[in-house]
Structure formats: structure tokens, C-alpha cells
């Protein structure tokens, strides 16, 4: 048999080395509370939160073609759920966080029922309308501070851990853990049978449908998962901030625009893209943030330039030049 | 009587919403592009009108003499310089590029004009009103705005269906490759469509700037109003878009009458209800 001479491989030496390095980096980051200052811990947490948001948005937009500009709906919803569950229902914040994820996944069902009727760019604006409905509705809830928002009561904050240092470390570990969980699940989803279906849909919707892939169900599956995880991230974000208001919780710039820029600059439709993008984004921010609005204008220009000149972003350029994949998704034929 | 009054106000402001929507609808019809920066371009026109009318001491309406051609040329250049490069089978590039543009315009305006709300002063017409029997008062300005919106939609409809330019638009929309074989330049046609869209945007911007105060971050909600009017009315039908705008305006005014906090919410809910029961809009002609 001639076929015996070949085998299908996914991993490469680059990907095996990168798993090893990733493992090493995660261990170092785990011990950050012992070697980093408080400001560094905050910065690291923020980087991980943006990496998570970007990976989830990339899964939606880059792999399912569901370009959402309304992810702030779930971030804000998670934040408000954390406040509501702890203040009104007396939940421990650490328990309220996973519960908020379940609520986020549940509420994404009726939302999907409505906005999945819109296609392409109209879907994008539809998600934005939903986020606005969330913002306006939560601004009406007087017991959570209405339009001006509220703070998490001290007793609830203390219930996480008694000392401030311990609290901050605990939140940091949760954010780190969730980020690793999200990156691993995005990778596993894309390697699974369903992920292959998603990549097929992305490459050719008509052809994949005629091969028997249920497009709506595949997209809905990803939409619900990303909604739930984004809601959990929202709860964590506002557990760290300890204060919430409708304008901060449902802010399109903070929770969607930056995330889109990160993914576009890093490389949309690749797992590595958001990681590169988040590093570029924070590097730019830490050096140029003093410029304020000019910084945002520059970010917009960079994103437009990348989209026109190199639509696959920084990672797309690197991987096509050096032919490497750190998270192997493609299958190659190899001589035995 | 209060209720009838607020419904009439809602109908009249619906004309403005239809104007927000008309430019969006036109370019979607011709090139399937949804311009996320549309609302920010409306606000840009309002600021442009403000600068022109205060520096040249002109009435806001007269500032259109300067603002219209600037926005028209800007639209053409934007389309040929940037947006044409993004059009293709993939919907992501145009969406993300116009999203980037939206952030650039917002922050550019913030840099130039600060975040303070501004307003244009149109003089007496802003307060003058027409008294109708039964205690109804209709402001001349909202009425004028409504009538001009209808005229502009009529003109767009005429251009699209009765002129050779409109034939070129429809031909490129139906099949751009065949249209190119017939000697049409796709890039030029798209440029002209964007120019017309920006001219409508300029008029909408001036009206908006006289009617309410505006600030650099006011764009996205105008985009959303325009988009809701398009979807409520049905894709590809400009008169439907006018009805969509009116439904949106009336729902917002009824919501505001019940509780001031519900104004915007009521408009969004009207949109979501239409989406749930008539997903293609009330009078749709074209599939997205």
C-alpha cells in the first residue's frame, strides 16, 4: 500500500517547544505575587483580561464570522451580576463569578434568537443595540445605583480574604487561571470536530453546508460559550475594580474597540494573533498613553493600515514567512 | 392632547432619523458596505457647519454651501483612497476599517473641539411654531426638517431609479463584473455613491446640530438610530426607511412621555420587536 508511506501530523518541533515554554511562563506568572509589586500585578491582570477578551472575540469574529461590536453587553452584565448576586442574594463573590457565567450563557440564547437574523455588518450593529439596551436598562435599576453606579460593600470585599494583599493575589490567580482556561479551550474547540466544522464554514460557507455542517448550530454553540466566558471575565473585571456604573460597565471603547484593535493588529483568525496583539497594545499604551486622544487616533490608523496592507496581522506575516504554528491546527502530510 | 403632541414630534424627528439612515442604506445597496463611521461623519459635518457658520458669520443653513462640497469630495476620496481596497468577499475588512475610522474621527474631534457639547444657532426659526386648532403646536423647524427629509429621499429615489447614474448604481449592485464589462468603472461608481451618501450626511449633520447639542462622542448613537430605521423599514426600500425612522421617533417620544429614562430604550425595544416578528423589516425589497 502506497498510503502507508505517509502519516498525518499536527504538531511540529516549534509547537512542542512552545508548549514547554508556555508551561514555564505560566509557572513564573503564578508566582508573580512573590516577585512583582502591586502595580505590576495590576498591569499583568489587565494584560490577561485583555488577552482573554481578545481570544474570545477572535473565536467569534475570526473563526465564525460573527463580528460583534457589543461584547461590552456581557462584560457589563457580568459586573452587574457580581454586584447583584453578592449584595442581594448574599453569595460569596468567588461563587458569584462562575454563576454569572451560567447566567451569561443563558441570556445569550434569546439575544442570539434576535440578532442571528442579521447578517454580516448588520449583525455587528445589532450586537451594539443589545449592549445599549443593557446599559440603559441597568441605568434604570435604582437599587444598584441607577445611572451613577455603586460600590461593592466593604463586608463583601472582606469576605474574599481578610488581608488586602491576599485578596489581590487571589483575584490575580483567578484571572491568570481563567486566561489559561480560555486559551486552552479555544485551542481545544478549534481542534475538535466542531472546530474543524467552524474552520470549514469560515473558508467556504456554501461548500461546508453542502457537506452537511449545520452552520447555525455551530455558530450558536460558539456564541453561547463566548458569551458565558465573557460574562465571567466581566464579573472578575469589576471584582477587581470594586466599583461599577453603567457607562464604565457597558463601555464600547474599553471592552470592544481595544479588543478589536488587539486582534486585528496581532492577526485575526489565528490563536497566536491575540497574544501578539495584546503585547503590542500594552507596549504602545505604556509608552504613549500620556498622549491621550492622539494615542487612540494612532491606534485607529495602525488598525486601518494593518487591515489594508497585511490583513492577517503581525502573526499572519510571521507565520507565512517562517512557516510556523505555535498552536498547531493545520494537518500536514509527512513521509514515514 | 399632550400625547398627540408628542406623537407628532416623534413623526417629525423620524424624518431626521430617515436622513441618518438614507446614506447608510444607499451605500449598502450599491456595494454591501456598512459604514460603522456613518454616525461620526454626521457629527463631523455638524462640527464643520459650526466652524463655518461661526467663522464666516453665516446662518447654519448657508454653511451648507461650504460643508456639502467638502463632505462630498471627502466621501469620494475616502472611498477611492481607502474603502475600495477593503471590498471583497470578506466582510471583515470594510467593517474593521470603518470602525477604525470611527475611533479616529471621534478622537480627532475631541482633540480639536474638546468634549464640551456644542450647538448651532439658527435664530428665530428654532422657536417659531405653527398653532393648530386643539392646542397643538408644531415647530416650524421640525416641520421644515421633516419636509426636507422627504424631498431628499424623493431625490435619492429619483437618482436611483430614473437617471443613468442610478442605472450604473443598480447595475454594479447586481453584478459588478458584468457592469465592468459594460464599461463602468466600479471604483468610480462606488466613489460617487459614497459622495452622495456624504452629501446626505452633511445635511443631516446640520439639522442635527441645530436641533440638539452635540459632542464628539455623539456619533455611535446616530449610527444606531439610522441602522434601526433601515432594519425596521426593510433593506433596500428608502420609503420604508422613512416609515422606519418615524416608528423609531414615535416610540422614543412615547417612551419619554412615560418616563424620561425610557426614551432611548423604547426606540431600541421597538426595533427588537420588529426584528423578532418581521426579521426582514416591514417593507423589505432586498436580501442582506
Image (cartoon, coloured by chain):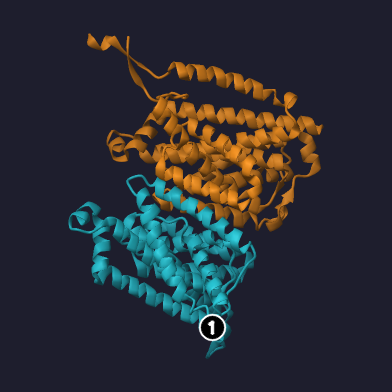
Chain colours: A orange, B cyan
Quadrant of residue B232 within the rendered picture = bottom left
The quarter of the image holding the N terminus of chain B is bottom right
Q: Nearer the viewer, residue B211 or A225?
A: B211
Farthest front residue in view: B56
Residue at the (54%, 42%) spot, across then down: A259
**Residue under circle 1?**
B139
**Residue at horizontal 73 percent and vertical 51 percent from the top:** A150
Q: Where is residue A27 in the image (x, y as percent from the top left)?
A: 64, 20
Q: Where in the figure is residue A121, as x and y percent of width and height?
A: 41, 51
Q: What element carries label 1?
A: strand
Looking at the image, which is closer to me, A238 or A330? A330
B18 sits to left or right of A130: left
Q: Is residue A77 visible?
A: no
Front position in the image: A137 or A330 = A330
Give the tally of numbered discs. 1
Q: Which of the 4 image quarters holds residue A146?
A: bottom right
Residue drawn at (43%, 33%) of the image: A316
Q: Is residue B221 visible?
A: yes
Q: Position of residue A14 (x, y in %)?
A: 46, 19
**Outermost left residue:** B182
| Rendered-image quadrant of the C terminus of chain B | bottom left
Q: Quarter of the image holding residue B139?
A: bottom right
Residue B123 to residue A291: above or below: below
Q: Mark 1 lies on which chain?
A: B
Nearer the observer, B256 or B155: B155
Which percent across, then down, holds residue A247? 64, 54
- In the rendered image of this protein, does residue A285 appear above or below residue A24? below
Q: How crowded is mark 1: few (under 14 residues within 10 Å), some or many (20 or more)?
A: some
Residue at the (51%, 63%) spot, across then down? B222
Amino acid at each position: 500500500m502506497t498510503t502507508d508511506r505517509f502519516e498525518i501530523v499536527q504538531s511540529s518541533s516549534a509547537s512542542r517547544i512552545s508548549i514547554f515554554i508556555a508551561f514555564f511562563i505560566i509557572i513564573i506568572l503564578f508566582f508573580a505575587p512573590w516577585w512583582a509589586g502591586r502595580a505590576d500585578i495590576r498591569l499583568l491582570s489587565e494584560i490577561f483580561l485583555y488577552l482573554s477578551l481578545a481570544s474570545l472575540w477572535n473565536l467569534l469574529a475570526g473563526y465564525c464570522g460573527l463580528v460583534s461590536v457589543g461584547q461590552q453587553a456581557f462584560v457589563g452584565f457580568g459586573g452587574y451580576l457580581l454586584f447583584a448576586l453578592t449584595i442581594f442574594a448574599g453569595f460569596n463573590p468567588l461563587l458569584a463569578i462562575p454563576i454569572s457565567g451560567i447566567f451569561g450563557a443563558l441570556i445569550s440564547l434569546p439575544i442570539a434568537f434576535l440578532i442571528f437574523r442579521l447578517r454580516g455588518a448588520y449583525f455587528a450593529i445589532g450586537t451594539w443595540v443589545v449592549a445599549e439596551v443593557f446599559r440603559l436598562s441597568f441605568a434604570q435599576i435604582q437599587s444598584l445605583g441607577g445611572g451613577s453606579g455603586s460600590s461593592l460593600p466593604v463586608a463583601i470585599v472582606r469576605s474574599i480574604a481578610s488581608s488586602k494583599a491576599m485578596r489581590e493575589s487571589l483575584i490575580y490567580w483567578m484571572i491568570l487561571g481563567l486566561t489559561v482556561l480560555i486559551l486552552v479551550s479555544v485551542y481545544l474547540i478549534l481542534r475538535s470536530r466542531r472546530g474543524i466544522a467552524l474552520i470549514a464554514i469560515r473558508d467556504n460557507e456554501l461548500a461546508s453546508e453542502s457537506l452537511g455542517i449545520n452552520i447555525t448550530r455551530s455558530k450558536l454553540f460558539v456564541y453561547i460559550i463566548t458569551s458565558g466566558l465573557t460574562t465571567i471575565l466581566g464579573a472578575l473585571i469589576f471584582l477587581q475594580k470594586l466599583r461599577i456604573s453603567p457607562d464604565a460597565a457597558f463601555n464600547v471603547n474599553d471592552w470592544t474597540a481595544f479588543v478589536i484593535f488587539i486582534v486585528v493588529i496581532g492577526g485575526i483568525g489565528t490563536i497566536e494573533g491575540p497574544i501578539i496583539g495584546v503585547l503590542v497594545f500594552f507596549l504602545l499604551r505604556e509608552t504613549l498613553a500620556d498622549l491621550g486622544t492622539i494615542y487612540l487616533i494612532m491606534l485607529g490608523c495602525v488598525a486601518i493600515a494593518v487591515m489594508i496592507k497585511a490583513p492577517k496581522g503581525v502573526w499572519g506575516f510571521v507565520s507565512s514567512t517562517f512557516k510556523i504554528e505555535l498552536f498547531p491546527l493545520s494537518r500536514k502530510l509527512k513521509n514515514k | 392632547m399632550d400625547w398627540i403632541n408628542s406623537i407628532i414630534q416623534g413623526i417629525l424627528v423620524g424624518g431626521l432619523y430617515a436622513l441618518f439612515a438614507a446614506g447608510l442604506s444607499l451605500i449598502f445597496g450599491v456595494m454591501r458596505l456598512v459604514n460603522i463611521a456613518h454616525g461620526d461623519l454626521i457629527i463631523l459635518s455638524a462640527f464643520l457647519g459650526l466652524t463655518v457658520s461661526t467663522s464666516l458669520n453665516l446662518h447654519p443653513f448657508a454653511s451648507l454651501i461650504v460643508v456639502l462640497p467638502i463632505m462630498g469630495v471627502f466621501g469620494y476620496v475616502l472611498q477611492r483612497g481607502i474603502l475600495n481596497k477593503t471590498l471583497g468577499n470578506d466582510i471583515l475588512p470594510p467593517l474593521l476599517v470603518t470602525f477604525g475610522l470611527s475611533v479616529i474621527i471621534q478622537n480627532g474631534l475631541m482633540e480639536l473641539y474638546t468634549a464640551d457639547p456644542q450647538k448651532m444657532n439658527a435664530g428665530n426659526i428654532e422657536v417659531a411654531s405653527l398653532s393648530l386648532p386643539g392646542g397643538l403646536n408644531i415647530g416650524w423647524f421640525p416641520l421644515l426638517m421633516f419636509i426636507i427629509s422627504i424631498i431628499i429621499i424623493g431625490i435619492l429615489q429619483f437618482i436611483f431609479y430614473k437617471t443613468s447614474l442610478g442605472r450604473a448604481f443598480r447595475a454594479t449592485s447586481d453584478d459588478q463584473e458584468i457592469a465592468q464589462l459594460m464599461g463602468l468603472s466600479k471604483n468610480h461608481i462606488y466613489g460617487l455613491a459614497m459622495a452622495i451618501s456624504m452629501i446626505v450626511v452633511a445635511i443631516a449633520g446640520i439639522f442635527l446640530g441645530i436641533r440638539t447639542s452635540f459632542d464628539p462622542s455623539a456619533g455611535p448613537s446616530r449610527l444606531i438610530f439610522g441602522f434601526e430605521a433601515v432594519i425596521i423599514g426593510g433593506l433596500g426600500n428608502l420609503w420604508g426607511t422613512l416609515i422606519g425612522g418615524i416608528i423609531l421617533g414615535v416610540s422614543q417620544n412615547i417612551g419619554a412621555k412615560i418616563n424620561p429614562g425610557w426614551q432611548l430604550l423604547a426606540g431600541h425595544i421597538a426595533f427588537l420587536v420588529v426584528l423578532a416578528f418581521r426579521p426582514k423589516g416591514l417593507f423589505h425589497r432586498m436580501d442582506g
